[in-house]
Image (cartoon, rainbow, N blue to C red):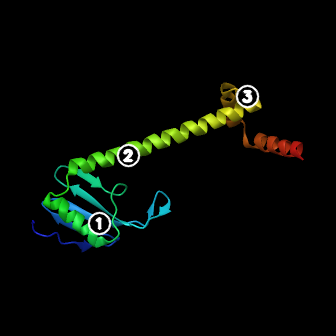
Amino acid sequence: MNKPLIFRNRAYGGELAQRDKIEYEIRYSQWLDGKKTEVPYYVTRFDKINKDHISTDRVKRFATSEQAKQYCQDMYDGKIDLSSLRAEIQADIEDRERKKTQIERDEAEIFKGFLCEKGVSLPDFLELVKLWENTNSDSRSLLYREAEDIQE
C-alpha cells in the first residue's frame, strides 16, 4: 500500500486529498435522477497534468464517506482499473442517451397520432405554429377569448 491519502474538508462541502498532482474528492448528493438515494457519496478524480477527470456520480456510489475514502485509496494504489471505470461511465452515458432518444421518439409518435386524429398533417401544423409565432400578442389574446367563448 502506498502512503495513505489525507483528506481535508472543503468549504462548500466534500473532502479533498491530493497526491502526485492528482486530486481525489469525495462529494455528497442525496439526489440521483430526481429521487432520494440511499448511497449519497461519490468520488471524483482529477489528474492536473493530463487534465483527466473521472466521476463515479452515476456508476458507483457509497453509503459512507469512509467507503468512498477507501475507494480513493484503492484508485491511488492502482487496485481500481481506470480504463474499465471509464468504459463503465461511457456505457452509462450511452445507455442514458439511448433511453432519452427512445422517450423523444415515443412522445413524437404520440403527438403525430393526436394530429392524425384531429385530421391535421404535421407540415400543416408546423405552418400554423409559424403563423402563431408571427401573430402579435393582442391578436393572440383575442383568439384565446374567442376560443373560450366557443367552449362555453
Name the foreground residue: 44 vs 37.
Answer: 37
Label 2, on which residue? 93
Nearer the N terminus, badge 3 or badge 1? 1
Q: Residue 41 lies in what quarter of the image?
A: bottom left
* Cα–Cα span, label 1 and label 2: 21 Å
Residue 86 screen position, x and y as percent: 27, 48
Residue 92 screen position, x and y as percent: 37, 47
- What element does badge 1 sit on? strand
Q: Residue at x 41, y 44 (%)?
A: 95
Report whether 79 appears left or right of 61: left
Q: Residues within 10 Å of mark 3 (few under 14, many from 20)?
A: few
Tell me if label 3 and label 2 are in contact, CB under 8 Å: no
- As displayed, is residue 115 above or below residue 86? above
* Cα–Cα span, label 3 and label 2: 37 Å
Name the foreground residue: 83 vs 136.
Answer: 83
- As displayed, is residue 88 above or below residue 30? above
Q: Which mark is residue 122?
A: none
- What element does badge 2 sit on? helix
